Amino acid sequence: YRGYPIEELAAHSRFVEVSYLLLYGELPTAEKLLTFSTRLNESSIIHEDMHHFFNGFPRGSHPMGILTTMVASLSTFYPVPDRLDETTEIQIVANLVSQVRTIAAFSYKKSIGE
């Protein structure tokens, strides 16, 4: 984990900080954390049509099965160009990190019948 013991990160860092660390190779300053957190929040909304997929899963479906299927379907809603510069690549990964949080929440709720 970029030179940090996992125990230290688990005890003293939040999800957004560790995500930043994994993407950029360093822990964020307070200003960078705020900017990154805002960017994640802005990209956490999933495409409206993805809700149809969720409705197609039976109640009580295993959340990991739902999550796997939904993450795979992201590429149909958010196509990625063939050639990426580093900035675009980091933005795409940040969007994925953010959207996975939303998809995981939907997957869990579906698995418990909500």
Image (cartoon, rainbow, N blue to C red):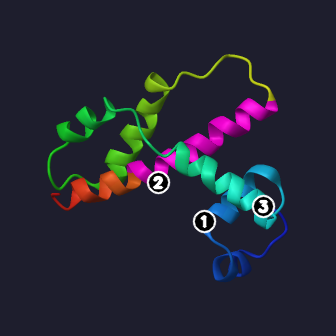
Asked if residue 39 shows in the view, the reply is yes
Tell me the kind of residue under disc 3: Glu
User: Going from the N terminus, do you reach mark 2 or mark 3 first?
Assistant: 3
| Res. 105 image quadrant | bottom left
Tell me the kind of residue under disc 1: Phe
Query: Dot 1 lies on which element?
Result: helix
Which residue lies under the disc numbered 1?
15
Which residue lies under the disc numbered 3?
31
Residue that lies at the very extreme toward the top in this rendered image: 82
Give how far across and how far down residue 27 sits, in percent.
80, 64
Give how far across and how far down residue 23 sits, in percent.
74, 50
- Of badges 1 and 3, the one in the foreground is 3
Q: In 3D space, how far apart are the residues under numbered discs 1 and 3 (Cα atoms)?
A: 16 Å
Which residue lies under the disc numbered 2?
101
How packed mark 2 is, by other alpha carbons closer than 10 Å (few <14, some 14-19, many 20 or more), is: some
Tag on residue 6?
none
Residue drawn at 77 percent across, 66 percent down: 30
How packed mark 3 is, by other alpha carbons closer than 10 Å (few <14, some 14-19, many 20 or more), is: few
Marks 2 & 3, CB-CB < 8 Å contact: no
